[in-house]
Image (cartoon, helix red, strand yellow):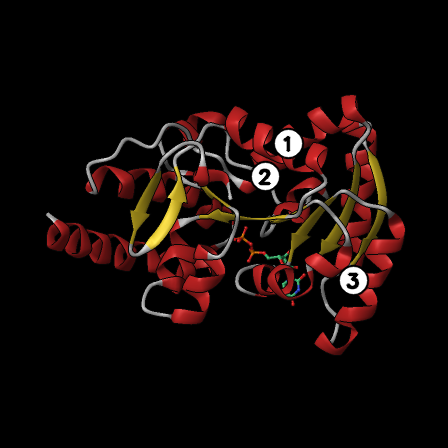
Amino acid sequence: MLNENKTDKVEILGLKVDNITMTEAAAFIEDTIADGNFARVVTLNAEIAYLSYDDKDKASLVNGADLVTPDGSGIMWAGEQYGCVIKERVSGIDLTEKLFSVGQKKNYKFYCLGAKEEVVKAAVSNIEKKYNVNVVGWRNGYFPLEESESIAREIKSSGAQILLVAMGFPRQDKWIADYGALTGVNVAIGIGGSFDVFAGLVKRAPVIWQRLRLEWLYRLLKDPRRIKRVLNLPKFMRAVKKDAAQRR
Ligand code: UDP
């Protein structure tokens, strides 16, 4: 586990988040690969945190991970409510891009699991072109759970070291918890809708929106169907305020 020797954790709604920078997260992943270990990574955003609050199974998916990164402005804000400055936002998509840049130099083997067939196919093609990394296999994320074992074996035979799973929370993180070790990879990360972005289907918010902590608003304006999900944000904020006040 990352925090047995290093860095501190921030507890947000009972969920333990690693207070780390992007560089530290990438270094942890590189060490895990070099040591031949297996690590499960959760990229925790406010929505995942809210869904895991008061839900034992989801909370244990988060708290049982080897690395939990602070993904998004909601988590940065929440850290402040508990009196802690979170060093840096480490989102799933940014961490993935960072790993592509490290992986290009170290020739890491990646496997992409998740999203619709045509989406993951386009994502892989763009990833190979743009980042010049070795993607040894891919598969869409719409399969019956009974196929999981054979998919895990397929991943194992690909020889992948880093498994990117983009099937949304909790499906992706549960799949990793249940089958990650079977896949033989060193690191498995849940990265939400990132393949939709790599495929060019969804545009990321411009950096200025990200800096203003308004990426959620940009995504809502682009896709108003997200309103139901966005409405979890004020609920998350209320829960955090209450929990932080109780801990004082
Ligand atoms: N997805 C999948 N299998 C499923 C359900 C969803 O592969 O059974 C994919 C979906 O196509 C999308 C991603 O999971 O690419 C989830 O995106 P979401 O918008 O939930 O991600 P986030 O908002 O967490 O980035």
The disc, 1 or 2, on the residue closer to the chain's N-terminal end is 1
Mark 2, other Cα within 10 Å: few <14 / some 14–19 / many ≥20: many
The percent position of residue 135, horizontal first and vertical second, equals 83, 40
Q: Are marks 3 and 1 in contact (CB under 8 Å)?
A: no
Q: Quadrant of residue 56?
A: bottom left
As drawn, which residue projects farthest toward the top? 105
Mark 1, other Cα within 10 Å: few <14 / some 14–19 / many ≥20: few
Q: Which residue is more in the foreground, 37 or 216? A: 37
Query: Disc 2 on helix, strand or loop?
Result: helix
Can residue 176 be seen at all in this image of the molecule? yes
Q: Which residue is more in the foreground, 53 or 38? A: 38
Label 2 sits on what residue type? Ile
Residue matched to label 2: 93
User: Quick check: 210 above or below 182?
Assistant: above
The disc, 3 or 1, on the residue closer to the chain's N-terminal end is 1
Mark 3, other Cα within 10 Å: few <14 / some 14–19 / many ≥20: many
Label 1 sits on what residue type? Asp
Residue matched to label 3: 152
Cα–Cα span, label 1 and label 2 = 20 Å
- Left/right of residue 74 with respect to residue 202 in the rendered view: left
User: Quick check: 149 above or below 125?
Assistant: below
Ligand 1: which quarter? bottom right
The percent position of residue 18, horizontal first and vertical second, equals 41, 40
Residue matched to label 1: 31
Label 3 sits on what residue type? Ala
Query: Disc 3 on helix, strand or loop?
Result: helix
User: Quick check: 148 above or below 134?
Assistant: below
The disc, 2 or 3, on the residue closer to the chain's N-terminal end is 2
Residue under the image location 59 percent in, 27 percent down:
27
The percent position of residue 238, horizontal first and vertical second, equals 20, 56
Mark 2 or 3, closer to the camera: 3
